[in-house]
Amino acid sequence: MKNSRPQAANYFPRDRAWHPQAYAPGYKSSVLRAPQRPLIAFANTLSETTGPAFGHDLIGPLDNDLTLNFAQPGMSAIGERVVVQGRVMDERGQPVPNVLLEFWQANAGGRYRHKKDNYLAPLDPNFGGCGRTVTGDDGTYAFRTVRPGPYPWPNGPNDWRPAHIHISVFGHAFAQRLITQMYFEGDPLIPRCPIVRTINDPAAIDMLVARLDMDASAPMDSLTYRFDIILRGSRSTLFENRLEGN
Amino acid sequence: MTNVTPGPLYPFKESPSQTAGPYVHIGLTPNFCGIEGVYDQDLGIAMVSDKTRGERITVEGRVFDGAGTPLKDVLVEIWQADTDGLYNSPAEQRGTADPAFTGWGRCAADQTTGHFRFETIKPGRVPFTDGRLQAPHINIWIVARGINLGLNTRIYFEDEADANAADPVFERFEHKDRVATLIARGGNGKYSHDIHLQGPQETVFFDI
Ligand SMILES: [Fe+3]
């Protein structure tokens, strides 16, 4: 009977000391939004080890080009032209192919196209701020954008977000679902940011800092930043009944 | 490599999470926040079609902070089995799920009231690790400003009392009174389910 077959538990537990703490008072918004009771753990079931799939046919030709996907014909967004590229892998170093990545960011002046953002920097009429792509068979991805500006935000008396791109990642399982942020190598605002500092381990913060890759940069066109993303790994092995792995 | 080499067993650590922030809509529901013309429509807004099999249901609710204020900037994703208990996922090995039902939905809360709402179907039952059937449930993932790592919880149904009473996940609860925080109220296809991030009614969140 198809519905009674047991399913092996298989995703590595999340290292919750490595992730930011839910309650991080330096980031004031977390104070009333952090659960206070212990999380309840149980072995992965199919509810956790399955997840939605999005095909390459979802992606339009400009979806991964934020300089053009909101621009008027013949126009493009203002700012430092940047390509972000990297690989999505799991904790075992296996590529994670065919998964949806979604990106959003402020424009080159640090302003979001959102009615809640009233920062005095101007909107760019040719920049929307969203993009998406699906990883290739080897887990690689790339998108073109402009480098977002830093922006001030109401937290402490003078807090600024470093330049960052928000990235949402689907894995192959709902248990791998992740949203994170990408920062830019050398930005002096990174160590000052209360949101960055919700992460305790400097090695974990370093994983969110994209590196300038001059060799991959296109002369007279754009700088390339390299940003690999690691999702939870799983314990599937040849000794389990799913020989093809995942 | 030998087993006495110090250091991590696996080459990488998971990328640490960061909050989705207050402008998550730009990336995940751009049409909802007025960024039109980039994507045809926002993903995950329509879960059922005429062809979807199963009992139509609606689930609506709000997410409350520790001061009792609804989150108006929250984004909720759900993931559930089809009416036969099969997931529409490449990792589903037991059979083929209803092709007219992806099982995945995404909803940005109403920016005035904080309500989320899903039109979906009642999910079938899915086995636990030992093969026993779990009670029908919808898996939820919640992100927002102030939430540093997405929160995982589930929605069960008040009118599935027998299945709920035998659910293997509920068995793990030391404090049985907390089961009630996961059970959507209602029947006849209409359910309401509020989620509390803190306080005496704090919803159970899972470390999955
Ligand atoms: Fe931001």
Image: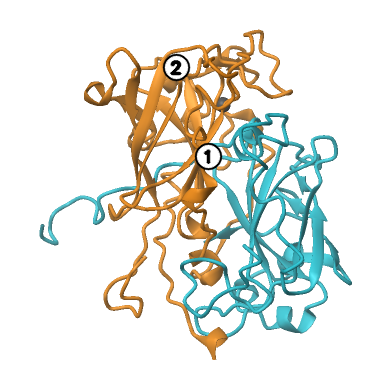
Chain colours: A orange, B cyan
Marks 1 and 2: same chain?
yes
**Is B164 left, or right, of B171 in this rendering?**
right
**Is A34 left, or right, of A107 in this rendering?**
right
Q: Which mark is residue A60?
A: 1
Label 2: which residue? Answer: A189
> Which quadrant holds the C terminus of chain A?
bottom left
Query: Taking the image as four quarters, which one is ligand 1 found in?
Result: top right
Q: Which mark is residue A4?
A: none
Q: Is mark 1 within 8 Å of ligand 1?
A: no
Q: Residue at x 62, y 8 (%)?
A: A121
Question: Would residue A236 be visible to someone looking at this image?
Answer: yes
Disc 2 marks which amino acid? Leu
Query: CA–CA distance between discs 1 and 2?
Result: 34 Å
- Residue A158 in picture, x, y percent from top left: 58, 12
Q: Quadrant of residue B96?
A: bottom right
Q: Is mark 2 within 8 Å of ligand 1?
A: no
Disc 1 marks which amino acid? Gly
